[in-house]
């Protein structure tokens, strides 16, 4: 019988130590505290408000902190018809958001222009911004927006956040390790 | 003064200035000359108590002469009566007199007509575009303006592109094909 040693065991820290990848921890933090930029441009904004209200309660997914300053936002929810007159303003607000940032195109209009195939409406916000999640519907139900948000969370959890955000540090580490 | 006497008085006041009169289901429409507009509008407001201007719209009868029509929808609170005044003006008529000093609400209506149809109003205090941005080069509600739009660009302000209509603005082709084939995307994904 080999003798068992319990020297590595310390009851004071037992249960308080988790081993994980740095990326996984970072992604977990990011995806559960997505602060939305409510880019409400048309009727989809009403459903966006309903999503934030008590019945659907977007706070269950950590995204209840609607910020009206782009500097404090992580995800822009483009909710509504983007007219050409508004398009560059939307782009500018997106550019003011700090990295990392994501975009949800909520509803038919924000995704493709919807029923407004006319001279005045941008045919999908993806012509100006990199859209991560498209939510179908006219307007989408709050459940659909929540599903879109969960899709975005899935997407974030697969990201290589550390390498994406600190490429020069990763390079240095790889040099040091090789 | 009742509604009937108001209309009778109107006929008497403007008898020779009325080009045509139409009655349809209780709606009265007078066609008048653009040069008489201000005088008639003022007397309608002051003497006949048409104190409320509901709307001003414009019509483009493209291919006809005169090309444009401007329609004034008046309402009288005391008589509970509607009155419609129409002007017919050709494209090279120039500027139509403003009524924004008679009914202040006309201010924005006239701006919208200028924005969408390109008809200018003489004496308007602030004739800027109201829906499109300053510098947009077209008048989009004219019949010779394509529904899908024309490209325009004002760097840092706004731009427009031609929209793909794919056979019509709101067409779906009846078939059992998938929605993707029935309603082609305005901008197919680049593969």
Image (cartoon, coloured by chain):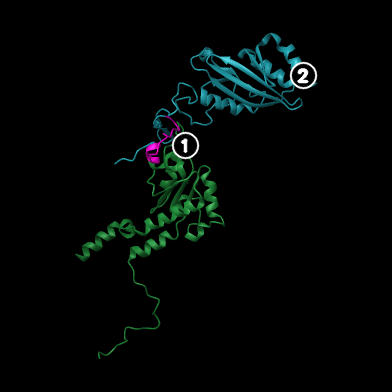
Chain colours: A green, B cyan
Q: Which residues are magenta?
A: B168-183
Front in this rendered view, residue A11 or B99:
A11
Q: Is residue B185 visible?
A: no
Give the camera-side residue of B92 and A133: A133
Q: Residue at x 37, y 56 (%)?
A: A155
For residue B182: magenta?
yes
Residue at the extreme right: B1
Q: What is the crowding at mark 1: few (fewer than 14 residues within 10 Å), some, or many (at least 20)? A: some
As drawn, B5 above or below A128: above
Say if residue A155 shows up in the picture.
Answer: yes
Instruction: Describe the element under mark 1 as helix, strand or loop.
Output: loop
Left or right: B29, with B4 as reference point:
left
Decide if residue B20 is on the left or right side of residue B167: right
**Mark 2 — on which chain does it sit?**
B
Residue at mark 2: B4
Q: Position of residue B86 (x, y in %)?
A: 62, 17
Circle 2 sits in a helix, a strand or a loop, which is it? helix
């Amino acid at each position: 019988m080999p003798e068992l040693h319990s020297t590595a065991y310390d009851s004071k820290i037992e249960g308080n130590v988790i081993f994980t990848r740095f990326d996984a921890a970072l992604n977990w933090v990011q995806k559960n505290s997505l602060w939305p930029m409510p880019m409400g441009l048309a009727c989809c904004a009403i459903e966006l408000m309903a999503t934030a209200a008590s019945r659907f309660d977007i706070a269950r997914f950590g995204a209840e902190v609607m910020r009206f300053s782009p500097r404090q936002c992580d995800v822009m929810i483009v909710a509504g018809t983007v007219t050409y007159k508004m398009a560059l303003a939307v782009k500018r607000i997106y550019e003011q958001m700090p990295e990392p940032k994501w975009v949800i195109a909520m509803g038919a209009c924000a995704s493709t222009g919807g029923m407004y195939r006319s001279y005045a409406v941008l045919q999908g916000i993806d012509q100006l911004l990199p859209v991560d999640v498209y939510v179908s519907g006219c307007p989408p139900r709050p459940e659909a927006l929540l599903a879109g948000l969960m899709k975005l969370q899935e997407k974030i959890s697969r990201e290589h956040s550390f390498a994406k955000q600190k490429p020069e540090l990763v390079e240095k580490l790889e040099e040091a390790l090789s | 003064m009742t509604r009937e006497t108001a209309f009778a008085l109107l006929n008497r006041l403007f008898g020779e200035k009325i080009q045509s009169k139409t009655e349809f289901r209780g709606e009265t429409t007078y066609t008048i000359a653009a040069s008489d507009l201000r005088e008639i509008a003022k007397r309608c407001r002051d003497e006949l108590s048409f104190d409320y201007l509901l709307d001003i719209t414009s019509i483009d009868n493209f291919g006809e002469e005169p090309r444009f029509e401007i329609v004034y929808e008046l309402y009288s609170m005391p008589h509970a009566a509607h009155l419609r005044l129409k002007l017919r003006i050709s494209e090279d008529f120039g500027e139509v007199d403003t009524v924004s000093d008679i009914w202040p609400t006309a201010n924005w209506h006239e701006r919208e007509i200028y924005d969408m149809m390109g008809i200018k109003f003489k004496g308007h205090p602030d004739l800027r575009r109201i829906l499109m941005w300053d510098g947009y080069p077209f008048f989009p509600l004219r019949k010779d303006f394509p529904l899908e739009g024309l490209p325009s660009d004002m760097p840092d302000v706004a731009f427009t592109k031609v929209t793909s209509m794919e056979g019509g603005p709101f067409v779906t082709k009846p078939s059992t094909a998938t929605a993707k084939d029935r309603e082609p995307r305005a901008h197919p994904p680049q593969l």
